[in-house]
Image: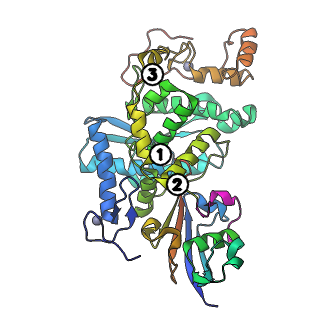
Amino acid sequence: MPPRNCALCDKARAIVKRPKTGQQICKDCFFHVFETEVHNTITEAQLFKPGDRVAIGASGGKDSTVLAYVMKALNDRYQYGLELFLLSIDEGITGYRDDSLETVKRNQQQYDMPLKILSYDELYGWTMDAIVSQVGKKNNCTFCGVFRRQALDRGAAMLNVDHIVTGHNADDIAETVLMNIMRGDIARLGRCTSICTQGEDTIKRSKPFKYAYEKEIVMYAYFKKLDYFSTECIYSPDAYRGHARVFLKDLEAARPSAIIDIIHSGEAFEIKEEVKATQKIQQTCKRCGYMSSNELCKACSLLEGLERGVPQAAITDRARKKLASEGGASENLRTIPYFQRPGALPPTAIVP
Amino acid sequence: MSSINVKIEFGGGLELLFSNQRSHRVSIPAKVPLSSKPEDAEKSPEDKPADITYLMYWLRDNLLKEREELFIENGSVRPGILVLVNDTDWELEGEGEYAIQEGDEIVFISTLHGG
Ligand SMILES: [Zn+2]
Ligand SMILES: [Zn+2]
């Protein structure tokens, strides 16, 4: 095939075909449109205001590495006036997270951003390695997901930031839309396409790569020679998500616009008020102060199960009954430090 | 029979299927049977220049150490793996039908591993 000129500048040779539009463009135009689209996503959703302290959830993987690079570039170019931080969670997975954290540490140097690493061990007293040795490989993703979510918020609070940006890309969001449809989780379906989530008492979270295709993120990292880490978690990956991903990639191969079309479909769903109302009212965990829809937050329930040797307690009814029959939590049970949102008033009474 | 030298790079976690080695230099035949799939090669005596589809099967048979299904699907590179020919998206170069030239650099990057 003869080399083709860029569809945008008509000067340089095209090197990439954009999945969203089918346009064939050159390297410089690709960098420019990729960055500009992220900038447009940010400004249209009014994600930031000058002076915001923003943490980038950094795993060392491709998405968050590219996100850190692009956030820094846009912050300089368009004078967002943000103070940027890298925030990494160390789940304590030997041979996986320790390697990817090395990548994040290099990113810290390369991008000149302060880095905070918060470990499960430090926060919960349990590494994922230790959790897996007790619960096995079947339900460990439940623990990891709940613990990571809360760890990110707590890490953000330690950095005194009020906003976390994550590297979720268009493919991730389309995949979540599909999964929520397949599971009939209509309440989540209504929420999963929003670019920014903020409950009353939660730290703001947003996804500047909401409309960025995975293909373009990887191409961007490749052409910019960005340093990222890529390997699958050594503990059982989410099989259901895996199926959704393969299905989505097959759809994309047949028709590349499928990903953005699915996101638009997700955005267009109108969720009935009755469905929204089934969401429980948020309260504060009586043990650790984190937001929760029950007396105890999920992390505290899971931790109590681990500590008392009934790790399924927060997962199955049978184990929960067993735990209840043994009486309440004892005095010296390990608990998570009390959570304080940045800027929030300290709790008036210290709750046990 | 003449052969061509090709530089191969694996990235994005795909190297794990290839002895965890990112860079390889290989030498493949310049002319190959019309059907790239070795299993069907005898049935197609005519020649064509070696293309990326041929290279894909060649890599499977000579360098791949495990889990073929993560590399090849339905006679092509598995969806979610990006291919670059001399730093150009293979979608601009005819994908699997691109005829490989002496000294080409072919890069395979998985997009499917961790974010
Ligand atoms: Zn151009
Ligand atoms: Zn709690």
Visual colour scheme: rainbow
- Can you give x and y, in whole percent of width and height, for residue A94 in the image? 66, 46
Read off the magenta span.
B63-77
Q: Nearer the viewer, mark 1 or mark 3?
A: 1
Residue B106 higher or lower than B70, as above or below:
below
Secondary structure beneath label 3: loop
Q: For this rendering, which residue is in front, A331 or A205? A: A205
Sort mark 3 into few (<14), some (14-19) or many (20+) by Cα contacts within 10 Å.
some
Residue under pointer 1: A171
* As drawn, A158 above or below A228: above
Residue drawn 59% across and 46% down?
A97
Q: What is the distance, in whole Å, between disc 1 and disc 2 at their CAs?
A: 10 Å
Q: Quadrant of ligand 2?
A: top right
Viewer-nearest residue: A35 or A286 = A35
Q: Residue at x 57, y 11 (%)?
A: A352
Whether label 1 lies within 8 Å of ligand 1 gets the answer no
Report the chain holding disc 1.
A
Location of the N terminus of chain A by quadrant is: bottom left
Query: Is residue A105 at least partly visible in the picture?
Result: no
Is residue B57 rendered to the left or right of residue A155? right
Disc 3 target residue: A340
In the image, which is nearer the foreground, mark 3 or mark 2? 2
Residue type at tag 3: Gln
Same chain, labels 3 and 2: no
Q: Which residue is mark 2?
A: B111
Left or right? Give the position of B55 relative to B103: right
Chain containing mark 3: A
Is disc 2 surrounded by few (<14), some (14 to 19) or many (20+) residues within 10 Å? many
